[in-house]
Image: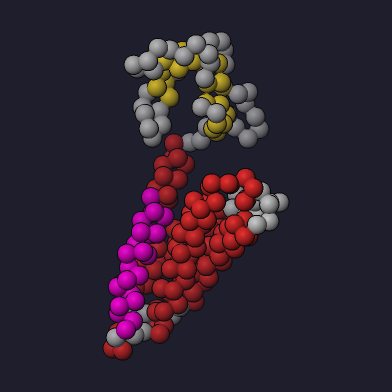
Amino acid sequence: MLFSDLGERNQVFLPVNATQFRSVPKKDPPSPAPTVELLAPLSDGQFIQIGGGTFKRIPVWLALLEILLVGWWVLAVVAVLVYVPFWLLAGLSKKRRRPAERAIRFWPLITVLSLIAIVVIFLLASEDFISRMGNPTPWSVYLFVATLAYGLAALVSIFVLWRMPKAEIRKGVRWFSIAVIVPLFISALYLAYWGIVGLRTWA
């Protein structure tokens, strides 16, 4: 059996029995024990257990779509962080102040800052992760608030974008806002579906 992922292509696995396989590295000796198992088909689809994780077989088009959406989301986050300094400097000039554009810029910024807060909380709490996140502590409460803020800010962003009259904002600002708000909103829906938005690690 050949297995490919983002880290390595065409990893070789030899069969041990009908459902189990052992890895054959290109340089190291073959693994003596099975490292891959094909699980019995379920109503949810076909699953495979490899490297301590369980993966579901999905169509190629769905995998490519997920990769494209993740790439779009990463570009949106970077674009917001890069654009913010220029926006703040432009706001200091009275000639370039446009009140109608403030909300359409402000809420994506809050969304991205909430994401940064989530990452920072995880990093700072990693030294004693179980006790800090497994109980109602400032760490777990801050994480709950940060994830909730991410979802709410993304929701407000898409609402402001939808309600904002086209005549009140410049065309370039509108297209830039669409390019960054849509992937942020999609990510918020995805995280909300998996219970990450409003995550209570102590519950």
Magenta-drawn segment: 71-92
Residue 12 position by quadrant: top left
Q: Is residue 83 magenta?
A: yes
Q: Nearer the viewer, residue 8 or 172?
A: 8
Residue 95 position by quadrant: bottom left
Q: Up-down: is 144 above or below 90?
A: above
Q: Is residue 24 magenta?
A: no
Residue drawn 71% across the image and 51% down it: 203
Q: Main secondary structure of the magenta part?
A: helix
Horizontal and vertical percent for residue 100? 41, 83
Q: Is residue 98 visible?
A: yes
Q: Is residue 186 visible?
A: no
Name, please, the residue furthest toward the bottom: 94
Residue drawn 57% across the image and 12% down it: 18
Q: Up-down: is 163 above or below 177?
A: below
Horizontal and vertical percent for residue 15? 50, 12
Task: Quadrant for the N terminus, please.
Answer: top left
